[in-house]
Every structure is written in structure tokens, then in C-alpha cells.
Amino acid sequence: MASPKRRLQGLVAATITPMTEHGEINFSVIGQYVDYLVEEQGVKNIFVNGTTGEGLSLSISERCRVAEEWVTRGRNKLDQIVIHVGALSLKESQELAQHAAKIGADGIAVIAPFFLKPWNKDILVNFLKEVAAAAPALPFYYYHIPALTGVKIRAEELLDGIQEKIPTFQGLKFSDTDLLDFGQCVDQNRQRQFAFLFGVDEQLLSALVMGATGAVGSTYNYLGKKTNQMLEAFERKDFSSALNYQFCIQRFINFVVKLGFGVSQTKAIMTLVSGIPMGPPRLPLQKVSREFTDHVEAKLKSLDFLSFTDLKDGNLEPCS
Ligand SMILES: CC(=O)N[C@@H]([C@@H](O)[C@H](O)[C@H](O)CO)[C@@H](O)CC(=O)C(=O)O
């Protein structure tokens, strides 16, 4: 069985794939991006080529090059780098898994194939097993995101007996709002050292109560520091402060959700907050409007989420 450095915990940023205005991958800013996550956001784990990274919109060779760049730039700076290697083709998934092992990633994650879908748990586990077997020394995570894959097999069901089938199974990335399913994943696997990584940033506090060991999300790219404050408050059992932080984060996410929120918007917000150009998304996603960015900038300032805020204290919405 694979032995990770230690159980993946805390915040994991679902990385954006920076692109040029011409739609090519902008590898040149990844080094700066690593430093920003570590130094400005206190986030030392990353999840590469997932939803936020537009992994399924990249070619296989692009995915390999992106993974390589993150591993190279993150060496001695980041704690753990998990590469998402899910694909519609088992062969491609295996190729990506082998590549992740070769470049020295710390783990791989896989979503359910979503065009020709597995229609029951056993079929899905068989698919995952074949991918995991291509990288037998790497910790393996299942990436549960039913709203996007359309594969609604409950995670709790999937986890039942999974280590017998997939000895490298190390944990679950749970991007869904079904806290009954999530809670039962934790409850039924208390004897195992699995990582339970929650993927709905606006509801993380509820998942911590249920036993989440960490979180993977898009907002940790730019709200990592604020979310870490929530984790610290939770750790010291200061639930009132933890709730304040969660509500504050929710105020922002609620605001952007109403404007329309997804990967394109994440790229624009990260560019605004970090100053590192993330570029436009790749088709079929659309670049966001200037109006969106202006609204978001005003909201971030009012919440004091921007370090360069120039508003008077009286105009700030208290967040702690
Ligand atoms: C559907 C989606 O993109 N969910 C995000 C969340 O971080 C999400 O952006 C956040 O909770 C705001 O709704 C993550 O779960 C996705 C993720 O971790 C990834 O990029 O792989």
C-alpha cells in the first residue's frame, strides 16, 4: 500500500490554469502563483487539473505539462500536490496517472467517467481500480462531484470495502452538498486513516463538524487566509468566531453566485486579488465582463478582503 508523507489535511487550493489572451497555457506565472499561495494565503497543498483548472478542457499533453510545471515550481515549497487524472478514456487516465507518478506528484484523483457512465458502484470501482493500478505507489483519491459528472452513486456506498479493491485508496474529495452522504462516509470509516476533503467552500464549517479532515476548493486561491482563520477558530473550539468567518466567506460567495459564478469568474477574481494574470478561460467557457470585475472589486473591498482596501473602517462589513 502507498504511504503518503502524512494524511492530506487543511486547505488544498484547486489551482487555476493560467492562460494567455490567445488561449495558450501561461506557464510563466506558475512559479509566482506558488509563492502567492504559500506566502499570501498560507495554502501549501494544491489540486491540479481539476474543475477549476479546466483539466477536462486541456489536451493530454497540456495536462502533463501543467502537472510538471506545478511539481517543479512547488518543490520544497508546497506540502502535497495531487493531480487530477480523470478522463473519459481509461487509457488516457492511466497515462496521466503514470505520468503523475513519474514526475513525483504526491497523489492522484479521479472523477467518474461522465459520458458513457458507470451505472453502479461495482463498475465505477472497477474503473477507478484500473486507473489506480497504473500508479501503484501513489495515494489515490476519488473525486465525487455528481452535479457535474451526472454520476449519482453515493460516496458512502462507494467507500464500502474500497480498500480491498484499491489498496492505494487514501481519501475522498467530496464536492456535493449532501451532508448525510458525507457524514456517513466519515462515520463508517472511522477506523481508517482516510482523508475526507470537502469541496463546497461556502459550507465548509458544517463539513468540519461532520469530520472533514481538509478541504479542496477554488476560493482557497484567494480566500485561503480567511478560511485558515476559520479552521484555526474551529480547532481551538471558538465556534462563534468560526461561524463569523464562515458567514463572512458566505457573504462574498453568495454575492458572486447571484452574479453567476464558475471557473471564468474564479479566474477573474484571482487575477484581481493576486495581481497575477490568470487570463481568459478556454471555450466553451466565456470571459467575464468588466462589469462583473468592478462589482466584485467593490464587494471585496467592503469585506476588507483586499489588502489594498482604501475604504474607511466605517464602510467595512465586519467579518470577525
Ligand atoms: C463546482 C465547483 O467548481 N466546485 C469548487 C468549489 O470550490 C466552488 O467553486 C466553491 O464552493 C464556490 O461555490 C470545487 O469543489 C472544485 C474543485 O475543487 C476543483 O476545481 O477540482
Image: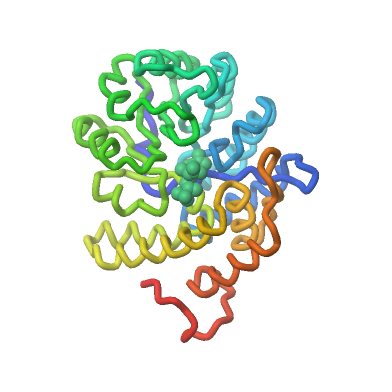
The quadrant of the picture occupied by the C terminus is bottom left
Most extreme residue toward the front, as rendered?
258
At 60% from the left and 31% from the top, the residue drawn is 56
Assign the N terminus to one quadrant of the image.
Answer: top left
Q: Position of residue 79 (x, y in %)?
A: 46, 43
Name the one closer to the observer, 117 or 132: 117
- Locate residue 63, reporting x and y percent: 64, 31
Q: At x 25% / y 67%, what residue is drawn?
A: 240
Q: Give how far across and how far down residue 243 sits, in percent.
A: 30, 63
The front one of 182 and 97 is: 182
Query: Observer-nearest residue: 24 or 202?
Result: 202
Query: Is 48 drawn above or below residue 111 in the view shown?
Result: below
Residue most extreme to the right: 22
Q: Does residue 138 sit above or below 147 in this rendering?
A: above
Height in image: 130 above or below 160? above
Q: Is residue 44 visible?
A: no
Q: Residue 161 appears in which quarter of the rendering?
A: top left
Question: What is the x, y in percent for residue 118?
Answer: 44, 17
